[in-house]
Image (spheres, rainbow, N blue to C red):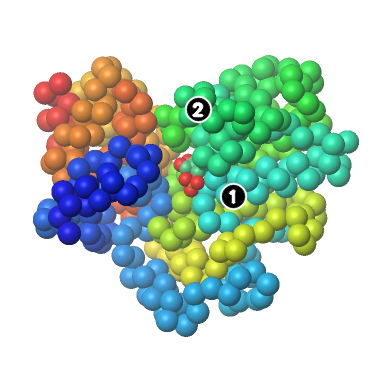
Amino acid sequence: MSLTDQQQLEQRYMLHTYRRKPVQFISGSGMTLTDDEGSTYLDFIAGIGAVSMGHDHPAVTRAIQEQAARLLHVGNYYYIEGRGELAQKLSQLLNAACSAADAAPWRTFFANSGAEANEGAIKLARRHGSLHLSGAYTIVSAMRSFHGRTLASLAATAQPSKQEAFKPLPSGFVHVDLNDIAALIQELDHPSAGTVCAVILECIQGEGGVHPCSLEYLQAVREETEKRNILLIIDEVQTGFYRTGGQPFAFQHYDIMPDIVSLAKGLGNGMPVGAVCARGEIGDCFEPGDHGSTFGGSALAVAAANATIDAMTQQGIAEQVVEVGGYLQQRLSGLPLVIETRGKGLMLAAELSKPVAAQVVDACLEQGLVINNTGPSTLRFLPPLICTITEIDLMIPVLHDILSAL
Ligand SMILES: Cc1ncc(COP(=O)(O)O)c(C=O)c1O
């Protein structure tokens, strides 16, 4: 079906929650996407950071095909192959940067998306608050954060423009400025809305424009929460699975240990799968019946996630992301109009001196480059982690010419 026909059908039969770009992708391979007219594009956004190992990764595709032919789904009343192994892999990755003495096992609940993973994290933190903190239930998050679009994850998402139309949101959420430890301590000690049970943070705010927590801030947050027995939830939905290079998770660059971590995006290479992971005895707070999901941890999702993680390890992606991400950041910083670059590994933003980011994104698409903007002057890059210097060298001249003309 042509793009025009598809547009007409969506216009008539879909809820208009997205302003889509005028392109219909029909296939992908590695870093490359192909549209319905056979034009190819270099993908520097990877399904918003989800297609971690590239489109049609041979091992992931094979695992999905084989699993689909055997068993898709039976529901969470039963055991299935691979789920325990996947949870064990997550525990090992979450403990990858800590000493054996600190390596308490992590326990996982599988969900289907990042928002659902955060819902699980919020519920677990509230359960912990009710059991161990005299009923504390308030969750503190950072201004400009993004944690999802369900009502509770939206309440944690401190972006008034996204929240406004859906009020009243669930209560028990407060927001403080990022990287301001005094503001957080004030909220922990003199709560403005109920006693605090948890703080939720992204190590690098993704949708908010690629803004990192400073090292001192995140370490101080950990110290101050630990002192008060308040949980620290790290949302690794966008930063997780080597996105920031070197380590599996961004929190590991900060030398801290969270209590709860939420995951999704890169875990399934495009298959919807999310996870909430609880460290050590925090996991004891959930009992059978406290939380659930029909599809979470389905046989298909588990097969995709196991294959994705195995591919990351086998392909040495941790080191590749450091090298290629460093190169991308250096090339971006030399471009016209770029006044700042932010981020780590292959999660990068280029801040422009003019509010022309949307125009740049559209011009890139016309020239076969898929990038994205998180604000009027912020370009964002989240390529598949298999991205190499070759693709960056193809992208930069195109971007250079577009920016020079503005
Ligand atoms: C940090 C973070 N948390 C949560 C979410 C929500 O994930 P999902 O869209 O899979 O619900 C996102 C999505 O961009 C995200 O970046």
Which amino acid, by three-letter code, is at mark 1? Ala
Q: Nearer the viewer, residue 20 or 84?
A: 20
For the question of whether residue 294 can be seen, the reply is yes
- In x, y percent, where is residue 324? 33, 46
Q: Nearer the viewer, mark 1 or mark 2?
A: 2
- In x, y percent, where is residue 209? 42, 29
Depicted 357 relative to depicted 27: above or below: above
Q: Are marks 1 and 2 in contact (CB under 8 Å)?
A: no
Q: Nearer the viewer, residue 374 or 394?
A: 374
Depicted 249 relative to depicted 402: above or below: below
- In x, y percent, where is residue 251? 58, 41
Q: What distance separates the C-alpha of mark 1 from that of mark 2? A: 23 Å
Q: Residue at x 78, y 26 (%)?
A: 194
Which amino acid, by three-letter code, is at mark 2? Ala
Q: Residue at x 46, y 67 (%)?
A: 304
The local secondary structure at tag 2 comes to: helix
- In x, y percent, where is residue 82? 57, 74
The local secondary structure at tag 1 comes to: helix
Kindly identify which residue carries mark 1.
117
Q: Residue at x 18, y 37 (%)?
A: 364
Crowd around label 1: few <14 · some 14–19 · many ≥20 (10 Å):
many
* Distance from mark 1 CB to nearest ligand 1 atom below 8 Å: yes
User: In the rendering, which numbered label is found on residue 165?
Assistant: 2
* Distance from mark 2 CB to nearest ligand 1 atom below 8 Å: no
Quarter of the image where one finds residue 137 = top right
Quarter of the image where one finds residue 134 = top right
Whichever of labels 1 and 2 marks the residue nearer the N terminus, that label is 1
